[in-house]
Amino acid sequence: MAENLYGQVSYGVFVYFSCYILFFSYKFLHASQKQRKFHGFALFCILCLVFWSNPQRAIVSYGIPIIAAIVWYMLGLAHTEYLDRKKTGWYLIVIVFAGIMLGAVLHAVTLAGFNYDFAPPHACWLSYDNMLRNVTLVPEGFLALFGGLPTADGEVVSIVGIYEAARFAASLALLCLIPYSIHTSLRQKGSGVAFLASFAFTALAGVLFVQVATTVPDMTDPILVSRYFVPSLVLSLILSLSQKLDWPKAPIVSLSTAAVAICFVASAYPAFVKMGNTSEYDRSITVQHQNALDGLKNFLLENGLHYGYAKFWNAGVLSVLSDEKLLVRQIVIDHGLPMPDRWLSSNRWYRPGAWQGETFLLLTTQEDEEEGDEAVDWDLLGRYHCKPVRKLSYEGFKVFVFPQNLAKYLSRWDRRFEVPGSFPASRESLHQVGKLYDDYEYAGSAVVVEKGEAGALHYGPYVDVEPGTYTVSFDVAVESAPEGSARLDVVASPDQKLLAETVLMDNTSSRRLRFTLDRLATLEFRVWSLGNARVVFKDVSIVRDNATWAAGSRSSISRDQPS
């Protein structure tokens, strides 16, 4: 639960937004006319924010639950005594719907102005068998959230075993207490606890429905997806532990509530103190624990390094620990080259203008020794003029320092290509005909096809390009042929839409193609041998003509005549 509230998934944000919505809604129902304006405006702003962020998630987590809470509250009011308060309830519903609508509109408008890589998944219904399977997996996630899932194959008769048994029993008791406390609270119509209970119950039921019946959560790991229950279960836990202990009338419920509270309080020591002392990140500091990367951060700064790249789990941590004195951007290794990891990142991090001067590539010792597609191909990196000038080591890390920003030379990084991006012939170049020479005529690598062979001498590299006007230049040498020696073109995947093309008759023919994109597209630069002459391909490059985005519809790709 602590990891889900305060860790990387940060579901504590959902909890406090739920609390804000509950607080301002309930205060609106009971405040004076003057105070009501403030509470209504605050609620409206919060709903706008949460629906602006993600309306699909917000409607399940906040929208439906708060409407259900208001309706249940209104149903619990007497017909005559609280007639004015019912009218206030209708005003509150109008504010809720207004906040939802404006937030959803802002979300749609915001996304319409951006090219984003990660579209939300489409929810589909599960089969009946899979629904039943998910029903059996939900309790596992519940037990794991409250620390009640015993360690598999652990000894029962031991100190740890007895402790886990107590946690397991407390979690099972809580599993029964939550529906009981919600039922008891809902019967107190018109009260604050009924307002909270109706919100928590509706939020819990909504997440449970999505988790059991749809494809939205990945139930291959029920413990991981149990985080969706965190906001509603935290509110339900508060509701359960705040119930009045009525020992004469409900001794079992009172005993269970007290036992759960004692178990959770007693668990604080091993969970927050003992576990921290045995953590691999401990540095014998009893008051403030120190992250293992803190020393690496100091080492990099001492060596005059301020901007670099590393894999996801090391990049952001170093930036935060250094208070952004050291900026480390996340990358992956793809076919031997560092490539941007655009998940939870910004495209501007990977542009040449983001940093001028030395940059570094940070790898763990294991990453440096890897083989295959996830290993850095230093020879290939050298062909892009990226050779490290210094190599540093710190504990389990290797640091490769480059004289300039890697983004300046690695063509796939900047999707705007304000600096020319080059794709030279190499082992990674895609071709159907021809032969690759590493040092053709002592002038670098090239793919050569002889007369009589027709086909794709080069295709790919399937690079993402942002809207704008671009010029693609081909470094191609051909022998003269009246019928044409080679055809050059630029196409957009996946529909292979032709953007620009030209046919080379001899070496005086233009090798530059100009075109305009009105939306983000994946481009392919192709060289076709027509079989009439010898053709040599060495390189293809792309550069943005200007910094102004192309005008027009974002849903289409326009084509200019080749220059």
Image: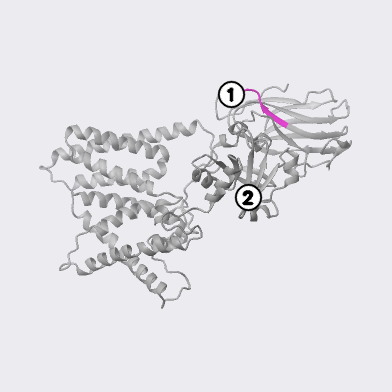
| Apparent side of residue 150 relative to residue 343 in the rendered image (left or right) | left
Prevailing SS of the magenta stretch = loop
| Image coordinates for residue 551, horizontal then vertical, percent | 56, 22
Judging by the rendered image, the residue that carries numbered circle 1 is: 550
Callout 1 amino acid: Ala
Name which quarter of the figure residue 173 lies in.
bottom left
| Image coordinates for residue 41, horizontal then vertical, percent | 28, 33
Are circles 2 and 1 on residues that touch, CB within 8 Å? no
Which residue is at a point 31% across and 62% down the rendered structure image? 265
Residue 377 included in the magenta stretch of the image: no
| Magenta stretch, residue numbers | 541-550
Q: Are there few (<14), some (14-19), or many (20+) residues within 10 Å of tag 2? A: many
Q: Nearer the viewer, residue 275 or 417?
A: 275
Secondary structure beneath label 1 = loop
| Image coordinates for residue 317, horizontal then vertical, percent | 51, 47
Which residue is at a point 80% across and 38% down the rendered structure image? 455
Which residue is at a point 43% across and 35% down the rendered structure image? 107
Judging by the rendered image, the residue that carries numbered circle 2 is: 363
Which residue is at a point 49% across and 32% down the rendered structure image? 112
